[in-house]
Image (tube, grey):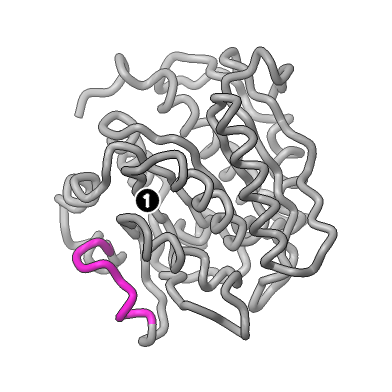
Amino acid sequence: MKCTQFKTSKIILIPVPYDQNQTWKTGAKKGPQAFLSAANYIELYDIETNSEVYKRGIFISPFIKIKSKSSKKMVKTIYDITKKYISKKKFITFVGGDHSISIGSIRAFGEQYSDLSILHMDAHADLRPTYKGSRYNHACSMYEASKKHPIVQVGIRSMDISEKKNIQKNHVFYMHDINSNDFWMKKAIQKLSNNVFLSIDIDVFDPSIAPSTGTPEPGGLSWYTSLKFFKKVFQQRNIIGFDIVELLPNTKNVTTDFLAVKLFYKLLSYKYELCSCYES
């Protein structure tokens, strides 16, 4: 993937190699490097949209180095960086790193957009107020956001019973419902406001296509079902930024690395090139 200079780029990619909050397998801090390594080998022409979105300019920021082990300080660092780039009027994207990095970015976008909603794609609800003594654990990544903004959760198939009280009513699209309901996409989009931050945990996908993640769950989304949904979302709502998190690379199987890169490039193609190529 070709990177460009900051001034001429419409898109910012921020790598965040942070995984202090992992609750099972560590290694998500290696996700951004694996992502960028795989990005060197993808084709830059997108057949579906008949476009080369990299020509819009993708600036890859320096890796965000979190020197402190404090999760609170990490969230503040991401918040400050997001605020900086919002002021530059760039389209901001992140690659992690564990899901706790989303807390800081959503906090910053929430200050910028009064009508912000969150589209949370994940196998897990991530709605615990605290976990293992921290408000900033990846198991809590959507709790703060859910108290401030409408949040639509898609792909959920694993949660603790304590999280049920924190769910926004009729805003969760569980995998067992998705598999039996042909109209879930329309219903999910209707619950989003105009300005949307999209947060994608790689484990939302089925492990058969995305095995390299810290907490895989069986029965996830397929590639083309996901793309069909994303196309509709980008066509009908204003996506103001997104993150892709929880890539835990495996040197013996780089499938998930390439899926993450392809997804990133697809989302940018939908953001900038979709309007004339897709009929709902």
Label count reads: 1
Looking at this rendering, what residue extends furthest in the right direction?
A: 67
166 and 242: which is toward the camera:
166
For this rendering, which residue is in front, 151 or 214? 151
Q: Residues within 10 Å of mark 1 (few under 14, many from 20)?
A: many
Q: Amino acid at mark 1?
A: Leu
User: Which residue is found at the position 46% from the left and 77% from the top?
Assistant: 128
Residue 266's spot in the image, x, y percent? 48, 32
Q: Residue at x 44, y 68 (%)?
A: 143
Residue 98 visible at all: yes
Kindly indicate the quadrant of the structure image that contains residue 27. bottom right
Residue 275 occupies quadrant: top left
> Which of these two is toward me, 118 or 3?
118
Q: Which residue is mark 1?
A: 119
User: Residue at horizontal 42%, vertical 46%?
Assistant: 223
Residue occupying the point 31% across, 65% down: 175
Would residue 108 appear left or right of 123 to someone viewing this image?
A: right
What is the quadrant of the C terminus in the image?
Answer: top left
Quadrant containing the N terminus is: top right
What x and y, as percent, mark residue 187? 17, 50
Task: Report the span colored magenta.
Answer: 163-172
Residue 155 in the image: state x and y as whole percent: 36, 61
Rendered position, 166 above or below 230? below
The answer to which image quadrant residue 24 occupies is: bottom right
35 sits to left or right of 127: right
Identify whether 198 is placed above or below 173: above
Decide if residue 2 is on the left or right side of residue 125.
Answer: right
